[in-house]
Image: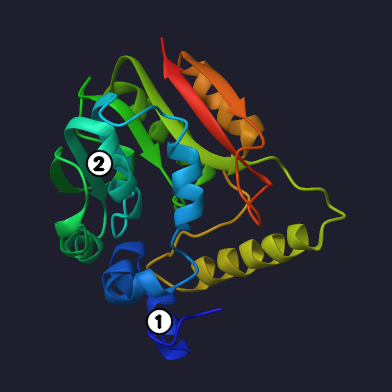
Amino acid sequence: MFHRDGPTFRELTRQALTSVEQGYDLLAPKFEHTPFRTPDAVLKAALAQVGPEASVGSALDVCCGTGAAMRVLRPLCRDRVAGFDLSQGMLDEARRLLADAPGDAALDFVRGDALELPFTAEFDLITSFGAFGHILEEDEPRLVKGIARALKPGGRFVFVTGHPPSALNPGYWVAKGFNAAMRVRNALWKPPFVMYYLTFLVPRARALLEAEGFSVEVREGGMPRPFTGLVTVHATKR
């Protein structure tokens, strides 16, 4: 499951007993060697649907982590690619890893809370990968509002998610069990560490985005194996 250069069990335990920000600061130097990083195959398949090289003016990756999506975004953009993350450690690692990223767009690294995006009509494209589990369900409307505010009219929010799994799927119960354990952990231990599965799936994501005035297109079948259960969502700001 973990690369030999990835975090040890002790390091993961230490991370899990801190806050999200502190946990990812600790994990940042080894994050690239964990299964938590969105695979390149998923990033490339999703962003191949955006358009050809230099077809986007400016892009923002929300909860950018160590910059994996920014590397794929940069050749698509003419002007700017911004990465936004709560963890300064992850941003520092992203800056280091992207020093040789292909493309000419300026790279920008901004630290902050995804629920308080400090942008207004600045981006043609916003993406987010692997981060929705860190947003509580009751906070998802704030996330969507911030993304809508940060996009220019006609701009797109592109992300990968899935449909709700069947209760007959063993993975459904594994995820439910993990979520239950995380709720117990957060009830008994402070600060909380927000990390849940089965979040921002297609029905809820569509409803929240449409309520905020987006037109939503769910694109099926564009992912390589073993990720064929994922879909790419293109939400366009009207």
| Kind of residue sitting beneath label 2 | Arg
Question: Which element is circle 1 on?
Answer: loop
Position in image of residue 4 (x %, y %): 43, 87
Query: At x 56% / y 32%, what residue is drawn?
Result: 205
Dividing the image into 4 quarters, which one contains the C terminus? top left
Question: Which element is circle 2 on?
Answer: helix
Q: Is residue 135 visible?
A: no
Q: How many marks?
A: 2
Nearest the viewer among 11 and 108 is 108
Query: At x 16% / y 34%, what residue is drawn?
Result: 80
Q: Is residue 230 above or below residue 191?
A: above
Nearest the viewer among 206 and 155 is 155
Query: At x 37% / y 67%, what residue is drawn?
Result: 191
Query: At x 35% / y 67%, what residue is drawn?
Result: 19
**Residue density around tag 2, few if under 14, some if 14–19, many if 20 or more, within 10 Å:** many
Q: Is residue 146 left or right of residue 36?
A: left
Nearest the viewer among 129 and 115 is 129
Q: Is residue 21 above or below residue 1?
A: above
Q: Is residue 107 left or right of residue 164?
A: left
The circle on residue 147 is none
Position in image of residue 37 (x %, y %): 43, 62
Position in image of residue 217 (x %, y %): 57, 22
Which residue is the site of mark 2?
A: 74
* Nearest-to-viewer mark from 2 and 1: 2
Quarter of the image for residue 87 reads bottom left
Q: Is residue 22 left or right of residue 226?
A: left
Q: Is residue 229 left or right of residue 57?
A: right
Position in image of residue 213 (x %, y %): 46, 13
Q: Is residue 4 visible?
A: yes
Q: Earlier in the sequence, mark 2 or mark 1?
A: 1
The circle on residue 6 is 1
| Kind of residue sitting beneath label 1 | Gly
